[in-house]
Amino acid sequence: MDHTNKNILNLKDEDSIDIELIEKSIKFINEKANESLYRGSIEIGEYILKHFFNDDIELASSRNPHKSKSYKALCEHEDLAVPYTTLTIMVRVAAQERFFKDKSINTEKLTYTHKADLVRLNNSDKKIELVKKCIKESLSTRQFAEIVDNTRKKMLAYKKSCTMETACKNILKIDQLLNKTLKAELITDINKLRVMRPKTRKELKDKASDLLQKIALTSKECKSLLKNLEKLEKEGG
C-alpha cells in the first residue's frame, strides 16, 4: 500500500462519527446550559421580586395583570431580552422558592422545568405533597407536567362546583327574603321607613346594599345554571 492510500485510510478513521463521544458531549453541554439557565432564571426572578414587588410573595404570585404598573411597563419594553411570559414565570418561580423555604422544603433536586410547571398551582400543602412525590419517585419533567396538569384540572373542577353550590345557596336566600311580606312592604312603603330610627334605617340600607352585591355576584352563576339545566332538558336528562 502506497503512502497516499495510507493517508486516505487515516483520514477516514479520523473523520468517522464517534457516537459515544457525541452522546457524552450532548449530556455535558445540556447539563451546563440548564445550570446556566437555572441560575440566570432564579437570579432574574429574585431581582424582580425584590425591586418590583417589595418581596411580596402573594402579590408576585397573583395572576392580576395590573398588579404593578412598573412591572407591566418592564414587560412591554422593546429592549427586554426575554418574552414577558418567560419573565413572569421567573418571578413566580422565585416567589414559589420563598414559599418552599418558609416551609423548610428542600427543592435542590427539582429542575427549573419542574418548578416552572409547579407555578400553575397555588402555594399550598398539595404543592408541597407533589414536590415530595417528584423527588421520591425521581419523576421526569414530562411525567411531572402530566401530574401537575391533572391536579390543576381537579382543583378547577372543585372550585367550579363550590361556586355553583354558593350560587344555589344565594338563590335560596334571595328567594326567602323576597317572600317575606314585611320586608317587601318596608322596601316599598316610605311612610314605614320614615318612622324608623336612623340607626335601623342605616342597618336596612347596609343589608339592601349587601343584597344587591350578592345578586350581582350570583347573576353570572344563575345564567350558567339555567343554561346547563336547559341543556339537560333538551338532552332528555
Image (cartoon, rainbow, N blue to C red):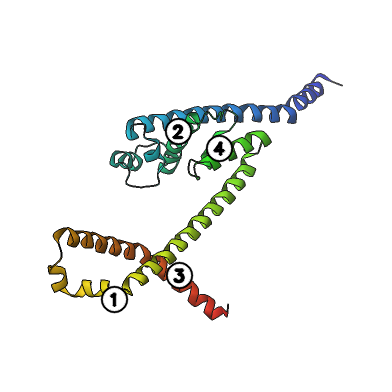
Q: Name the residue that disc number 2 marks.
A: 94
What's the residue type where badge 2 is placed? Answer: Ala
Number of residues whose C-alpha sits closer than 10 Å to that of mark 1, classed few (under 14), some (14–19) or many (20 or more): few
Q: Give left or right: position of 70 versus 227.
A: left
Task: Note whether residue 16 is visible.
Answer: no
Sequence order check, earlier mark of 2 and 3: 2
Helix, strand or loop under label 4: helix
Q: Position of residue 118 (x, y in %)?
A: 53, 41
Q: Residue at x 39, y 39 (%)?
A: 58
Res 125 label: none
Between 155 and 49, the residue placed more toward the observer is 155
Q: Residue at x 56, y 78 (%)?
A: 235
Helix, strand or loop under label 2: helix
What's the residue type where badge 4 is placed? Answer: Ile
Q: Quadrant of the C terminus?
A: bottom right
Between 192 and 130, the residue placed more toward the observer is 192
Q: Position of residue 7 (x, y in %)?
A: 77, 21
What's the residue type where badge 1 is placed? Answer: Thr
Res 128 label: 4
What's the residue type where badge 3 is placed? Answer: Leu
Look at the picture and state if 81 lies above or below 232. above
Sequence order check, earlier mark of 4 and 3: 4
Number of residues whose C-alpha sits closer than 10 Å to that of mark 4, classed few (under 14), some (14–19) or many (20 or more): some
Helix, strand or loop under label 3: helix
Helix, strand or loop under label 1: helix
**Disc 2 and disc 4: Cα gap in Å?**
15 Å
| Quarter of the view holding residue 221 | bottom left
Task: Note whether residue 173 is visible.
Answer: yes
Q: Name the residue that disc number 1 marks.
A: 181
Instruction: Tell me, yes or no, whether the two marked residues, 3 and 1, touch with CB atoms within 8 Å.
Output: no
